[in-house]
Amino acid sequence: MATRTSTIVHKQSANPSFLKATFAIIWKDVAAEFRSREIFSAMLVFSLLVILIFNFALELDIVTRQSVTAGVLWVTFAFAGTLGLNRSMAVEKDRGCLDGLLLAPVDRAAIYFGKVISNLVFMLIVEAIVLPVYSFLYNVNLFNPGLLLVILLGSIGYIAVGTLLASMAIQARTRDVLLPILLFPVAIPVLIAAVKASEGFLAGSDFSTIYAPLSLLIGYDVIFTAIPYMVFDYVVEE
Amino acid sequence: MFPLEAPPDTSAYMIAGYVIFFVIAAIYLISLLVRWRNLNQDMTTLEAIEKDNKRKAEKPSKEQKN
Amino acid sequence: MQSKPPALKILDISSVLVLAIATYLALIYAPEEAVMGQVQRVFYFHIGTAWTGLLGFLFAAGLGIVYLVKQDIKWDIAGVAAVEISAVFFLITIMLGSIWARPIWNTWWTWDPRLTTAAITELIYIAYFMLREGIEDPDRRARFGAVYTLIGGISAPITFFAIRLFRTIHPVVIGGGDPNAQGTFAMTPHMEVAFFFGLFAFTVIFIDLFWNRIRMGQLAAKVEQLKLNLMH
């Protein structure tokens, strides 16, 4: 109870070091990842394998490619995202970094946003490599600004809720299997909206048909950044 | 909607539906009862162990409680 | 454990009674529907469990918020009770709906918004129990459970709207008129009696189960506490 009130007080005093703390966490993650490359390489190799498997599973000929590209891409991103999220949070836990961070006099929300942004960076880098590889392998042009926007928005929503759930999952006994089970049913709206919007942009449809999924995506991002921000304290509290 | 004079005979589905309802309800009730009984058993055993521990702790020396 | 309070005993008996009456009203009192035939009678229990199940999930999300604010384990015990009973009710809803759909839509399952949302909601609450299962510390388990019911309670309606981007064939019996819906019907007064009594009956049954389940949760918490005390 005492820690609870102290963190609340902490949050209320408009902390000038909030941004500094957030950036410190991002910087720590990116620097550590730059040295070990373990999360990034796992995500990347895994995504490429998923795309290869889809090639055999769906017989991606010219006609099918048109209709399933958006779906294949988002399934790949979702799977790779879970892998990255699990690893990035498990590393914190195993090396005792999380405990250190929690002891540090920084706002818990700064820890949350720091983790979200560094996870997002990993996911976007993987996506930035997967997209050209996919275009190259299947001869589909994916360099469409609309599609890139959808990928950014979809990744934000997915990572925002995923970071919260991953920090719960790693504290459970069954942590390796738990994250996808917790995350997928909750992330379904963002995946549906992202697939619909990507399909629309890829097919070059009229903006009026893309408007609904796109606004849903933005709404999801806002809601699922705000809620984890509010409840993250309860998830990391000892 | 359906170009039919008399309603189709769908009573088999109706019966199946209500059978499934009562089966699931029964399974849930039984699971509640079983869990309740197990908890009660645990409770009595735990209380017995606790009493035992207290007695043991009191007899030789009062070094440990709980 | 002390014996059941008399009010709960009365509630137990009345829920058995209302279930019997609801079954009578649905199976015998209500007339046979002209287009769909006998299978339409499944609808009374389908809607009854669906409504109470949905409200139960919302209620659980509310209890989750109360738990996070108050940090008192009793709210968590109530939350688990609500989620568990709602999950059972929702399973019944899905299975009854599926049985109704076979003769009417000619398929056991279709990826319609309501069906899909129902299935995903059920999966969210199965995940909820798997999450709790994996955590030993009671306070942490309660906190995580509360957070997840909150996230799930917000995500489920969004899922519904997301899938609404596709078309629906699910009938809306109360206050709806989607021309694409298949299996809609107008209720006669007798049907309305069976329908509203069904809603009432399942509400009573929910409250009765909820109370019983809370008592069980309290006992489980006591047992867990005793075990922890003995280990130290």
Image (cartoon, rainbow, N blue to C red):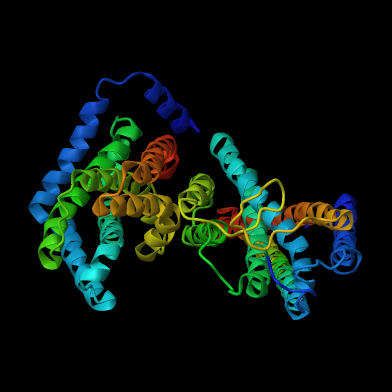
Question: Is residue A81 or residue B54 the one in the foreground?
Answer: A81
Question: Is residue C111 or residue C35 the one in the foreground?
Answer: C35
How many numbered marks does the figure carry?
Answer: 0
Residue C191 x/y as whole percent: 85, 58
Q: Quadrant of residue C4?
A: bottom right
Give the residue drawn at x 61%, y 74%: C106
Q: Going by the image, does C182 lie left or right of A12?
A: right
Residue C50 x/y as whole percent: 68, 57
Q: Quadrant of residue C171?
A: bottom right
Residue C201 x/y as whole percent: 82, 56
Q: Which quadrant is the N terminus of chain C positioned in? A: bottom right
State whether residue B59 appears in this view: no
Q: Going by the image, does B17 lie left or right of A191?
A: right
Q: Note whether C57 is above or below B8 in the view shown.
A: above
State whether residue A216 appears in this view: yes
Q: Going by the image, does A233 lie left or right of C231?
A: left
Q: Note whether C150 is above or below A86 in the view shown.
A: above
Question: Is residue A214 or residue A11 the one in the foreground?
Answer: A214
Give the residue drawn at x 24%, y 24%: A17
Q: Note whether A160 is above or below A69 in the view shown.
A: above
Question: Is residue C231 or residue B17 the one in the foreground?
Answer: B17
Give the residue drawn at x 49%, y 60%: C127
Give the residue drawn at x 62%, y 42%: C63
Q: Going by the image, does A163 lie left or right of C83?
A: left
Residue A156 x/y as whole percent: 30, 43
